[in-house]
Amino acid sequence: PQPVLAVVGRPNVGKSTLVNRILGRREAVVQDIPGVTRDRVAYDALWNGRKFTVVDTGGWEPDATGLQAAVAAQAELAMSASDAVLLVVDATVGATATDDAVARVLRRSDRPVLVAANKVDSERAMAEVHQLWSLGLGEPMPVSGLHGRGSGDLLDAVLAAL
Ligand code: GDP
Ligand code: MG
């Protein structure tokens, strides 16, 4: 069976956009309205000749109570059902309480965890990336799921972790 990468993070950080970038096609549903992605969806991906499975997560209602608990539970599930986890954070917003809650769960993971500092569309946005060291999960990797900036380096790191 091929290795599994789970993509987790709070709604609207760009998980599905990044998954589409990883796939090189538009299969994961991207929406301005948080909570559009179904609970967990698995896709076949290929990078540098290696096949792996990418699991996009989501599925929370925009007005759901207990968002932090729901996202943390999703991260817990992703951790147990994958070989590596990619935590996606919106670098233009910085680490929110929900991001911290997910990071707390992931720090207990015995699997590799990578942090994608997403929405770094320009060199200027790089300035905010270092703040995401606060998540305690190592070096945040700047990426723009929308424009593709940094996605090659991120995928190389993902493959090295899987
Ligand atoms: P998800 O809820 O985490 O799956 O987030 P989506 O992939 O659905 O994206 C949420 C919103 O963020 C959409 O409006 C995307 O177009 C936008 N978005 C995603 N990635 C980027 C990015 O790299 N840069 C910018 N500027 N916007 C992005
Ligand atoms: Mg989504």
Image (cartoon, rainbow, N blue to C red):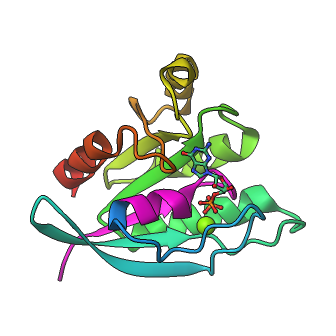
**What residue is rendered at 71% in x and 47% in y?**
98
In the figure, 87 relative to 95: above or below?
Answer: below
Q: Is residue 93 left or right of residue 67?
A: left
Q: For residue 81, say whether it is visible.
A: yes
Residue with the most extreme left position:
49
Splitting the image into 4 quarters, where does residue 154 fall?
Answer: top left
- Residue 12 falls in which quadrant of the image? bottom right
State the residue at coordinates (63%, 75%). 37
The picture places residue 111, in percent across and down from the top left corner, at: 32, 55
Q: Which quadrant would residue 6 be assigned to in this image?
A: bottom left
* 142 in magenta: no
Q: Nearer the viewer, residue 93 or 66?
A: 93
In the image, taking residue 149 as reference, residue 56 lies left or right, namely: right
Residue 8 in sight here: no
Over which residues does the magenta segment extend?
Answer: 1-21
Instruction: State yes or no: residue 13 in magenta.
Output: yes
Task: Where is residue 25? Give x, y as percent.
Answer: 39, 71
Splitting the image into four quadrants, where does ligand 2 fall? bottom right
Q: Position of residue 122 (x, y in %)?
A: 51, 27
Task: State the quadrant of the N terminus.
Answer: bottom left
